Image (cartoon, grey):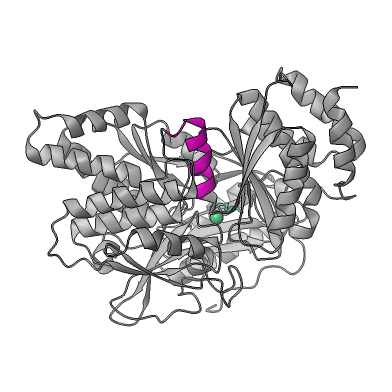
């Protein structure tokens, strides 16, 4: 018997797979009710060790269910450079998660054989978790697996998802990306941010103050930590900090974006700046109260265009030959795509939902800005971009203006968390740009006006009955659905609609936009009815919009 079996089998016996449960490595890992996840966590611990042996690098495991309700939980595996687990290994993770204890040995052997893994190579796993009550015991299940494989691990306790991604990259680059500690993360971001502030002329109308909706999650705790470093530079007032409310309940980026309204627990006042994080602080949206009292949202699309526009200007003012591009998903508002490509003249690419897809597409550019409309995104700089920005910032033959612009780019690069979307880092990035531009949130928001839109969910028997192509913008199955959607869309002006199975919930999502809200609502409803009819809807058919 192989040596590992002697310790893995008895440990696995303590983490039996539940009968009748099927698990899928979805848009962002495994995610479901927390009480169904013990065996999945153990198996993810096994996968992390195997991946670590295969890559001969440290691998991350993050325990969180992001914006989902507190009773849910989940797990994501992080690659050596801080990216999401590669697709080929998602398949292995899924096989392992669905293997009974009897099948487990065979599946592990298969993975070892397929990948030629040398089991004598040492492995290292880095673990962190969010604030959910179920997270400590699920994290313990991951650790059981690592111990059973006799591998090394570091448990960082409670962190935001992007902090864990950052740490994995730091460890694997021997500190080149930053110091591999939580303090190192604050240090890197705050140093770059304060440098940018020092460079910006002092006497201006920028408001160095922001109210942060922490979604009652881990982001709230971490903003308070960062605040210590940014005293006198940015005043971050945290509400929904977890001291009373429940995680993601009536608060957080998803609640604000989907409901297009402010979160609970906020004193919503004119003239103030607000932002909302999600439960694991990898998403952010901004909002404010306009003078007429209405709610205004700056979502991921607005954040992306703000960042891309500013970076493009800086690159041009230094005179660098770097290709900057924007990556969005089909959920990006049509107005943002038009504004980016036609007004800002930034090339726009469309990727499938899920940051792993956006991240991959962003690698095609020297500077790739990627954002989901829901506020999940970041900027990545290629090696070429990093090198040319760094050397320009040190080039004494450049004019002072050009050099200053290069130094700004360098600092902005350090404010970005290049491993994954990061609410804290994105907030600092946005604040730096608003200050440099002397923009209020009203100024920023007026760049373009969103097309009215609606997002709906439809319950069906098997959501995978819906198959899509063209970055999820067209349905290829069930037969006839896309044709019916096209006919419906044609009835409305400036309209667009698409459907896809969610990767994190057992639903089909329907998106629609049109030139007015009534049409967008009606179109979404019409398409939801089509999905319910043609794709095996369960329960009552969708309810018509209020206005009709
Ligand atoms: P699914 O459930 O696959 O639509 C949702 C979001 C994604 C992404 C993931 C991970 C929408 C429409 N979908 O995915 O953008 O953020 O959750 O958290 O917002
Ligand atoms: Zn999240």
Judge from the rendering whether residue 544 lies leftward or rightward of residue 222; answer left or right: right
Q: How many marks?
A: 0
On whether residue 211 falls in the magenta region, the answer is: no
On whether residue 173 falls in the magenta region, the answer is: yes
Judge from the rendering whether residue 163 lies leftward or rightward of residue 92; answer left or right: left
Q: What x and y, as percent, mark residue 53?
A: 67, 25
Judge from the rendering whether residue 89 lies leftward or rightward of residue 328; answer left or right: right
| Residue 199 in the image: above or below residue 120 | below
Work out whether residue 108 or residue 375 is closer to the camera in this orientation and state it: 108
| Residue 277 in the image: above or below residue 337 | below
Q: What x and y, as percent, mark residue 438?
A: 18, 61
Query: What is the span of residues highlighted in magenta in the rendered image?
Result: 162-175
Q: Residue at x 32, y 26 (%)?
A: 384
Q: Residue at x 36, y 30 (%)?
A: 382
Q: What x and y, as percent, mark residue 174?
A: 47, 31
Quick one: quadrant of the C terminus? bottom right
| Residue 489 in the image: above or below residue 184 | below
Q: What x and y, as percent, mark residue 136?
A: 70, 56
Name the image quarter holding residue 247.
Answer: bottom right
Name the image quarter holding residue 447.
Answer: bottom left
The reply to whether residue 407 is visible in this rendering is yes
Q: Residue at x 88, y 47 (%)?
A: 14
Q: Magenta stretch mostly in which secondary structure?
A: helix
Work out whether residue 118 or residue 321 is closer to the camera in this orientation and state it: 118
The reply to whether residue 506 is visible in this rendering is no
| Residue 147 in the image: above or below residue 485 | above
Q: Residue at x 45, y 35 (%)?
A: 361
Quick one: quadrant of the N terminus? top right
């Amino acid at each position: 018997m192989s040596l590992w079996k002697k310790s893995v089998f008895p440990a696995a016996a303590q983490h039996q797979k539940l009968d009748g449960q099927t698990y899928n490595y979805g848009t962002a890992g495994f995610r479901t009710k927390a009480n169904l996840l013990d065996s999945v966590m153990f198996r993810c611990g096994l996968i992390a060790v195997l991946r670590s042996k295969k890559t001969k690098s440290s691998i991350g495991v993050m325990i969180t269910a992001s914006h989902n309700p507190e009773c849910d939980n989940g797990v994501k595996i992080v690659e050596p450079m801080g990216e999401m687990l590669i697709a080929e290994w998602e398949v292995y993770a899924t096989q392992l998660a669905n293997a009974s204890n009897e099948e487990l040995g065979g599946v592990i052997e298969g993975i070892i054989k397929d990948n030629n893994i040398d089991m004598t190579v040492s492995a290292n796993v880095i673990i962190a978790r969010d604030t959910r009550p179920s997270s400590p015991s699920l994290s313990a299940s991951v650790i059981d697996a690592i111990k059973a494989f006799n591998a090394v691990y570091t448990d960082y306790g409670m962190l935001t998802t992007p902090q864990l991604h950052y740490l994995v990259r730091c460890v694997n680059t021997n500190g080149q990306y930053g110091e591999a500690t939580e303090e190192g993360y604050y240090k890197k971001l705050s140093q770059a941010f304060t440098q940018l502030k020092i460079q910006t002329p002092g006497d201006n109308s920028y408001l160095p103050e922001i109210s942060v909706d922490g979604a009652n999650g881990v982001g709230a705790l971490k903003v308070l930590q960062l605040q210590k470093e940014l005293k006198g530079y940015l005043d971050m007032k945290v509400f929904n900090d977890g001291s009373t409310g429940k995680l993601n309940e009536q608060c957080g980026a998803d609640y604000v974006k989907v409901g297009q309204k402010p979160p609970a627990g906020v004193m919503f006042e004119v003239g103030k700046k607000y932002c909302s994080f999600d439960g694991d602080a990898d998403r952010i949206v901004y909002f404010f109260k306009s003078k007429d009292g209405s709610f205004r949202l700056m979502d991921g699309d607005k954040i992306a265009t703000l960042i891309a526009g500013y970076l493009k200007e800086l690159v041009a003012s230094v005179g660098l030959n770097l290709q900057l591009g924007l990556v969005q998903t089909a959920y990006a508002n049509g107005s943002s795509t038009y504004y980016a490509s036609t007004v800002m003249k930034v090339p726009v690419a469309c990727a499938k939902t899920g940051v792993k897809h956006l991240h991959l597409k962003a690698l095609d550019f020297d500077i790739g800005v990627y954002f989901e409309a829901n506020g999940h995104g970041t900027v990545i700089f290629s090696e070429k971009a990093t090198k040319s920005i760094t050397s320009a910032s040190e080039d004494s033959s450049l004019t002072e203006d050009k050099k200053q612009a290069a130094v700004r780019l360098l600092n902005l690069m350090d404010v970005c968390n290049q491993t994954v979307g990061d609410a804290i880092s994105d907030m600092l990035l946005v604040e730096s740009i608003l200050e440099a531009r002397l923009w209020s949130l009203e100024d920023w928001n007026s760049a373009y006006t969103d097309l009215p839109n609606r997002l709906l969910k439809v319950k069906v028997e098997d959501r995978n009955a819906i198959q899509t192509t063209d970055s999820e913008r067209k349905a290829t199955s069930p037969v006839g659905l896309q044709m019916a959607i096209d006919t419906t869309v044609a009835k409305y002006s400036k309209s667009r609609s698409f459907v896809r199975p969610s990767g994190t919930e057992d639903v089909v999502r329907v998106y629609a936009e049109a030139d007015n809200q009534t049409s967008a609502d009606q179109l979404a409803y019409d398409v939801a009815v089509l999905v319910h009819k043609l794709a095996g809807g369960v329960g009552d058919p969708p309810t018509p919009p209020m206005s009709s």
